[in-house]
Amino acid sequence: MVDIIQEREIDRSHMQVSDEVAIEIRNMNKWYGSFHVLRDINLTVQRGERIVICGPSGSGKSTLIRCINRLEEHQAGDIIVDGTELSSDLKNIDKIRSEVGMCFQHFNLFPHLTILENCTLAPIWVRKTPKKEAEEIAMHFLEKVKIPDQAHKYPGMLSGGQQQRVAIARSLCMKPRIMLFDEPTSALDPEMIKEVLDTMIELAEEGMTMLCVTHEMGFAQAVANRVIFMDQGQIVEQNEPTEFFNNPQSERTQLFLSQIIGH
Amino acid sequence: MSDTHAQTVPYVRDTMLPQQTPPVTEVGAIRWVRENLFSSPMNAILTILSLFVIYWVVSHLGPWLVNGIWVADSLTECREIRNATLGEDASAACFAVITERWQQLMFGFYPNDAYWRPVLALLVFFVGIAPVLFDTLPRKLLIGTLVTPFIMYMLLWGGSIWGPLVVGLGFGLGFAIIKYVSPVNSLLGTIGAIILPIFFWLYAAGPISSGITSVLPIGLEFIPSKDFGGFTLSVIIGIAAILLSLPLGILLALARQSDLPIIKWSAVVFIEVIRGVPLIVWLFTASLLLNYFLPPGTNFDLMLRVIIMVTLFSAAYIAEVVRGGLAALPKGQYEGGDSLGLNYWQSMQLIILPQALKISIPGIVNTFIGLFKDTTLVVFIGLFDPIGLAGAIRASTEWNGIYWELFLFIGVMFFIFCFSMGRYSLYLEKKLQREHR
């Protein structure tokens, strides 16, 4: 797993973390019915930071990043994204969503639209970009994820890895300031994981603020500047990657790491 | 070559095999017959039995159809012609009833000299609907589609040309409010676009149109709804109800999924009540009971009442069919739209409905076919649809005693309409097919 990434040199010249706060989460709590999924989460993300969130399934890591663009509603505490507080105000929610890109485990491309239409939909309707310009932007990002030649096909005709790269391009077309990744490689064949991770690394090299829920520890070691370990709805440990992997403090983290790296 | 491969366990193919033609028994008609008709003793027996049944039906019906008499003035005359040419025992259909009463079956009591109007209206309908049905046609034609209902109303009912024009002006008013007020304040724009046109129609439209009419009386002869009948009536009710019930049904389906309890529960109650009561009861309600609730002296067109009832009835069914389509979409599609910042109506219009409606096409068309056939129920509230006219024709002295030929004709006509709807739905499904199967 690790060597996929280590083959390549990472260009760190643009990977600077600024003092500006991109996301601030204060005392956030969430329940599903009576089940307490997220417990007292506190997290500050600086602009340019790349954070990897890992943990066993059911630990609330996906729920946490889905709260950041309000795909899930939190019941207590504050989430402030790019200076805008998430409340039930629909205008704020739509504004935040258009600033925050998201990639899903199952891509969630729109199967009835071509790749190009998938990418231009939101710029045209949300940003009111003229169609021609939106298509140019879309082609630019499709070239970046290396599939411009597929632009007129439908998502169903592409491989999983290609679909996920289209999904990344689709988010980038909105020129987001923050990108959320929810297990982007979990539904992919091993051969396709690399192409998606490469795309994500390129994005990191350009200085994008990223929050990734992933089990790709090689990716975490290569680009993350913080790894967060979650269990039972709480942040159990966070540290910079070298320390996190070589010298985990909590027992729970040690157990988790021994289980996923042992193979 | 292959022998040497078979003897060694590590195996490497050194030559690729070329394609070969299949054996003769595996291709063409012989194969088809073997596979489909005589693949087992049981199937062979069933094949022979079916052939016998087909022979029996054709040998009985064939002469009746082929000997059919097309020109006669009454059933008695039909029989005389048959006796003279074929003999008393021959079986012969008397299709003369259809040729002689053709106009009545088609137009009911519509004035003879105005038959061109429903025919032209039907043509206008096909021209208007074409760009909606086939997206290969230029999109600009859709503007014509918007005007079509007014032209059709004008042709069918007639009267002053200013009536439909002023009603159309109301729609224009609503559209203008959406276009110019909504960007400033979307809530005010939406409410204004609904309320103002309604007030306009209720209080201003009548005086304005009669005012202009008195100055400039342009129009066609007015034909009251009671003169409509036959297939004209069925097709008008059918088309109007189909076109109105689709958008209403979609809105109901969305309302039923709403997070707002008032909207959700009103949709649920509406759908369940409408669906739970037979259409015929609603038609009786429309024709009889409504009079008790309306102020005395109001003359609310019976045909309009029927169209409203049939529309509401089929909208409830459409809503459930569309709800099925909505439920079949993965939650990820909603989230995909949300995560890009699309608002509710945008993500419904651009992402959810195109897919949900595609899934629902067979169900929707099924409902439409059912609706179109159900229009024959209006005979029970005294409207003369083809079934009602068939009764009237059979009650006349000339055609007393005839029935197979009439109902066969009505059946064939309905079949043509319904079958074409079914074929169109298949075409649409195929066209919208996106995934490789």
Image (cartoon, coloured by chain):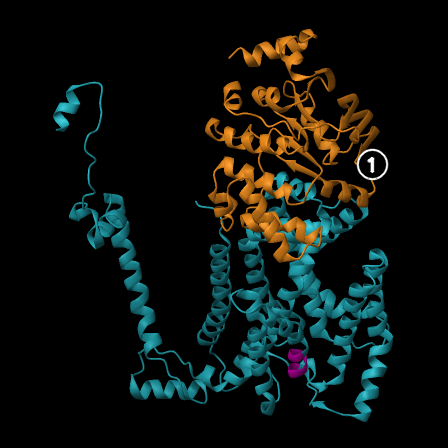
Chain colours: A orange, B cyan
Q: Quadrant of residue B165?
A: bottom right
Q: What kind of residue is marked 1?
A: Gly
Q: Main secondary structure of the magenta part?
A: helix
A216 vs B337, nearest the viewer: A216
Count of labels in the image: 1
B100 vs A217, nearest the viewer: A217
The residue sitting at the front extreme is A13
In x, y percent, where is residue A209? 70, 32
Q: For the point 63% across and 18% down, which residue is it?
A: A56
First to last magenta residue range: B151-156
From the viewer's perspective, tell me whether residue A147 is left or right of residue B88.
right
Q: Quadrant of residue A64?
A: top right
Classify B425 as above or below B125: above
Q: Is residue B87 magenta?
A: no
B401 vs A107, nearest the viewer: A107
Secondary element at tag 1: loop
In x, y percent, where is residue A24? 80, 29
Classify B72 as above or below B7: below
For disc 1, the neighbor class at 10 Å (few under 14, some 14 to 19, many from 20) is: few
Q: For the point 55% across and 62% down, which residue is it?
A: B369
Can you identify the residue that label 1 sits on? A83
Q: Is residue B278 visible?
A: no
Q: For the point 84% across and 59% down, which residue is it?
A: B184
* Chain letter, disc 1 residue: A
Q: Is residue A138 visible?
A: yes
Classify B406 as above or below B70: above
In x, y percent, where is residue B249? 67, 56
From the viewer's perspective, tell me whether residue A215 is left or right of residue B11.
right
In x, y percent, where is residue A240? 69, 17
